[in-house]
Image (cartoon, rainbow, N blue to C red):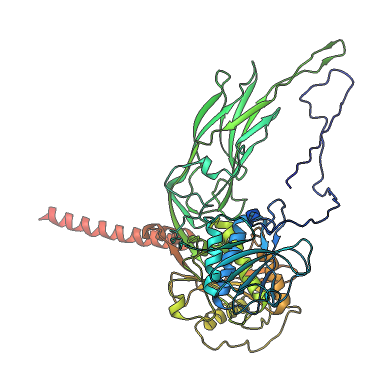
Amino acid sequence: SNNQITLEFVGHYQNICERPSSETLWLNVDAKSQLSLVKQKVKITNDLARWPAPFIDTYTNNPSVIPVVFAKAPASDTKKAAAILASLVGKYTQWRGADFPVYYDRVPTDGHFFVFATNSSRPSFLNDLPLVDGPHIFMMDAPESRSDKMLVIAGRDDGDLITAVKALASGEHVLIGDKLPIKDFKEPTERMAYDAPNWVPIDEPIAFSRIMQYPGQLTSRGYAPPAVHMPMSVAPDLYMVGTGGLDVNLKYRYTKPEGGDQAQLRMRINNYLIDSVNLSAQTSSGEREMRLPSFNGPLATSPSEALALAAQNDLSFEVVYRRELSEGSPDNCKSVVLLPHQMEIDPASTLTLNGLFHYAEMPNLTLFTQSAYPFSVYADLSRTAAVIPKEASAEKVTTLLNTMARISSVTGAVATKISVVDKASETALDGKDILFVGEMPITLPDFKKDNAEQLQQAIADSLKGEEVLQPEEILFSPEGGVGAIVSLQSPFDSDRTVVALLSEGQSGSYLLNEKLKSPSSMNTVAGAVAIINEQSIVDFQVGDSYTIGNLPWYHKIWETMSNHPLLLVLCALVCAVLVGTGIFYFMRLWVRGRAK
């Protein structure tokens, strides 16, 4: 199922005496080139050993589209089971994304799909499924299809559905045959803060082997070996101070440069040069300590910020060989054979992030859209509560599931500890970051800052159970509906955050879900409120700001001063006056003492 097409270009730029390293000849394959295949689906056996196939496709760059079927609008615990399963899909699909169209008591028209069924509530096409005596997972043929499959999550009640998907996510059960009864399931322990599998921890050396994604990733071969790349993700709220930074202990091997030739090893981060070293022709291995220059402040949010860490980084290593070859002349041709080179970065090399704290100024949708923050701090979402109406539409449930997959694509963990409720209450939401899914509480008069503030306040009022007031005058109502992402401080806990995913009708839900299904979308969104329409995304920085994290108080003072230069000047003047006054009175006392 995984194939590779090789294109080879053979050409000459003159009849004789060609220089092997000449760049006269080149080939560019257009990225828009297309490969057309005549395909036909074949029926496969119902065997859970194939999992995650055929439901999840990781051989393409496109999002996996997996319909999810319920008998009716699901209860909170059924939504929780579906959310956990969606997060498991996100763990597999990673940057590709996932989309979960939701159906109520209806068979999807095409493709493999998931079904949730209890003994008392199941889609009509599963009426013939025998009652179960506990959590079960089935792989079955989809109704009225020759090739499609359905993964049925079944149980006596909603609690069994949660147990079944947690067991599937644990990977501790042997998947074989067309059904799996879950017995002796052991509840997973809660994860610690910032221990997401996809994130590099701080203050400890991490071997490259822990970050590598596949064998051979750190090996490069060829006449001009291409750079090797190693993605490196970190917690998005890291804050660097003083001498903190990234230290790399690099171990490498390479083919020796031939006599008179030169070779150089270069290390880059996000395509910016960090360090380079000339390679000796006397040996074929080496070791080098490299360091990213330190800086003060939060991580970079844009690739244009040079020499700064970001939440997602690209470490690259390249060996460049230099050799001068002459073409000769028709009477004196020089025959030269180029030998291919090879470079290997030792997986035992280490990197260490040190001298960093966790600190973020909120609300900040950039952190949410790029890194699912703050929900991703606890990768199993043990500190997250999702609030979604009891009778939520299918589109709203899709919003929840797409978001869950998006979060797990960042963390690499399954959200086994998330709470799902249908009504906001201080008891359920205290100490939790809140993911709110619902209808737009007010009709936006226009896409302006004042209206964004009204929307933010309406979310807070809605969560507290207060009456939501509509704007006095509706000057503009967008045709077709809009989607919105709103962030604000939790009304139940000052250290927690609310992120609300809102939409107007089906068209607004479609716009929002299209953005949520792809982890790389919305990377440029910023501020506290983002309005999504058919043409663009408009964002606003509104509302009160607040900070979360463990940055010491003296660094917080410096952070405040650095963002307000006039305040820094004023404080400097006040300090100068106080010090000068103190010196003045001290000198007067000293003079009086001498006069006596």
Q: Residue 469: x percent and y percent?
A: 58, 88
Name the residue rendered at 83%, 53% in the picture. Answer: 39
Query: Between residues 536 and 368, which one lies in front from this camera angle?
Result: 368
Q: Residue furthest right?
A: 15
Image quarter of the C terminus: bottom left
* Horizontal and vertical percent position of residue 124: 70, 78
Which residue is rendered at x = 23% and y = 60% of the image? 585
Left or right: where 372 falls relative to 524: left
Q: Position of residue 8 (x, y in %)?
A: 81, 34
Q: Farthest residue to the left: give it.
A: 596
Residue 213 vertical placement versus 159 (above, below): above
Residue 83: tell me if it is visible: yes
From the viewer's perspective, is residue 542 above or below residue 35? below
With respect to residue 315, does 146 lie above or below? below
Front one among 79 and 450: 79
267 or 243: nearer the eye?
Answer: 267
510 on left or right of 41 = left
* Circle count: 0
At 53% across and 36% down in the image, what residue appears?
A: 347
Residue farthest to the top? Answer: 331
